[in-house]
Image: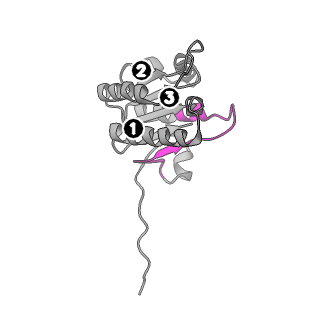
Amino acid sequence: MNDKKPALTLKKIPSGIEGFDDITNGGLPLQRATLLMGGPGSGKTVLALQILVSAATDSGTPGIFVAFEENARRVSANGKAFGWDMVELEKKRVFFLDARMRSDVVKAGAFDLTGLLAALAEVVKEMGAKLIVFDAIDVLLSLLDNPAAECRELYRLQESCQGYCGEHPQIGR
């Protein structure tokens, strides 16, 4: 008699990146956030953008790229260097949200993600986005005063995005 329980199968969305889907057994997990970590210049932004572009191109899955550090227009322009038709993708399936903090803005008092989440909810609703990339979220979190506040806002961000996007993942780096 075999007492082993059958392994649970985790539903995934293909990344569209040759080899990546093989080593991850199918891509990114649905209903989960995926965190990309690495040093400066290691390719986190490019990898996240490629996953977003592949989803939009291969399966028509719309997505949003939220840029906290680099100018969103520059990220889109970098996509052209890979041969991606960013102009066409931005018409229907990929939206770039520039969420960088302006250098002349001074943070005073409590800070949270309420405004960003409201703006994001509107874009998700308007375009039916299923994927959200948060690029350089550590820059945003540095505005918070303590690790507990950072964790609280990260959980809030994930819960909100799961509500917006249903069973599709969010990618943070």
Tell me the quadrant of the picture where the C terminus can be found: top right
Q: Please rate how many residues cluster around mark 1, counting C-alpha atoms within 10 Å: few if below 14, some from 14 to 19, many from 20.
A: many
Q: CA distance from mark 2 to mark 3?
A: 34 Å
Q: Position of residue 99 (x, y in %)?
A: 50, 22
Instruction: Say which amino acid is labelled 2.
Output: Glu
Instruction: Say which amino acid is labelled 1.
Output: Cys
Q: Is residue 137 magenta?
A: no
Q: Secondary structure at mark 1?
A: helix
Say which label, 1 or 3, has the lower sequence index.
3
Q: Secondary structure at mark 2?
A: helix
Magenta stretch? Answer: 26-48
Q: Position of residue 92 (x, y in %)?
A: 35, 23
Task: Residue 110: give its label.
Answer: 3
Task: Residue 90: give its label.
Answer: 2
Q: Please rate how many residues cluster around mark 2, counting C-alpha atoms within 10 Å: few if below 14, some from 14 to 19, many from 20.
A: some
Of 92 and 41, which appears nearest the observer?
41
Instruction: Say which amino acid is labelled 3.
Output: Ala
Which of labels 1 and 2 is toward the front? 1
Residue shown at the point (60%, 14%) measured from the top left: 103
Residue shown at the point (45%, 44%) measured from the top left: 14
Q: Which residue is mark 1?
A: 161
Q: CA distance from mark 1 to mark 3?
A: 22 Å
